Amino acid sequence: DVKVTQSSRYLVKRTGEKVFLECVQDMDHENMFWYRQDPGLGLRLIYFSYDVKMKEKGDIPEGYSVSREKKERFSLILESASTNQTSMYLCASSFRGAGGEKLFFGSGTQLSVL
Amino acid sequence: RKEVEQDPGPFNVPEGATVAFNCTYSNSASQSFFWYRQDCRKEPKLLMSVYSSGNEDGRFTAQLNRASQYISLLIRDSKLSDSATYLCVVNSPVYQLIWGAGTKLIIKP
């Protein structure tokens, strides 16, 4: 089974802190994604990556950055956390090509910024 | 108008009943469609893809209506374990997955 592991299930941070969310997948997938999920809004794409050291902005990249130094790891960084970044963050991966729309998700990180 | 819209529900349905819900999309050039299931406080998981001719997987049937730009999910003989939020996903021409906000389904004994 594909495993996508997110480093923390719950995280509480203070406004202005730098926050790192880590995601690791074990299936050699090329594609990796970071979403946030808020009630009534559905999943919104923050950043995605199709290869090592490659990154593309999604719909809501402001206030976030990412890093993909190794194929299996995709990190989301909040440079200076703000209260409006309180959300559920979901990492996902998929393979490139046909069927690549099947995303495998990590169990999510519920981030609270106080 | 949102690109992908779903009735948020909740749909409260007795066990054993049939339930159906739709998802509308705005981009007529959308190419592929999916239903994901998300249990409370869990991650989404792919339930099924939606093919042009319609497709069935056990008690679940998915259909696509391109003319009216919606997809549907029908669940027959509903089980308590079907209680979840069902997310509609549409793949636009530039390979961007657009997610609906989900329809919450509650199956009651």
Image (cartoon, grey):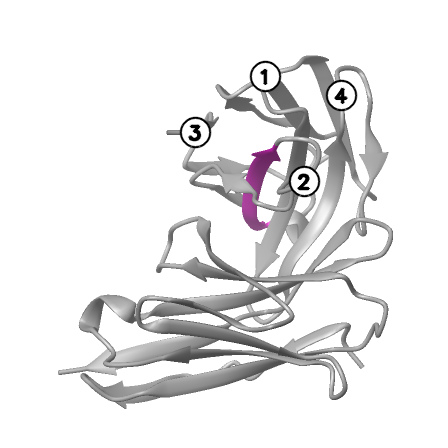
Asked whether the beta carbons under mark 2 and mark 3 sit within 8 Å of each other, the answer is no
Q: CA distance from mark 1 to mark 2?
A: 20 Å
Pointer 4 chain? A
Asked whether the beta carbons under mark 3 and mark 1 sit within 8 Å of each other, the answer is no
Question: Which stretch is magenta?
Answer: A86-94
Between discs 4 and 2, the one toward the N terminus: 4
Q: Is residue A78 above or below residue B14?
A: above
**Label of residue A2 in the image:** 3
Between discs 1 and 4, the one toward the N terminus: 4
| Dot 1 and dot 4 within a common chain | yes
Identify residue for label 4. A51
What amino acid is at disc 4? Asp
Identify residue for label 2. A98
Q: CA distance from mark 3 to mark 1?
A: 12 Å
x, y percent for residue B23: 61, 79
**Label of residue A72 in the image:** 1
Residue A89 lies in the magenta stretch: yes
Between discs 3 and 4, the one toward the N terminus: 3
Q: Nearer the viewer, mark 4 or mark 2?
A: 2
Can the viewer see residue A18?
Answer: no
Between discs 1 and 2, the one toward the N terminus: 1
Mark 1, residues whose alpha carbon is within 10 Å: few (<14), some, or many (≥20)?
Answer: many
Q: Is residue A92 left or right of residue A53?
A: left
Q: CA distance from mark 4 to mark 2?
A: 16 Å
Along the viewing direction, whichever of A89 and B101 lies nearer the viewer? B101
Asked whether the beta carbons under mark 3 and mark 4 sit within 8 Å of each other, the answer is no
Q: Is residue A58 left or right of residue B9?
A: right
Quarter location, residue A20: top right
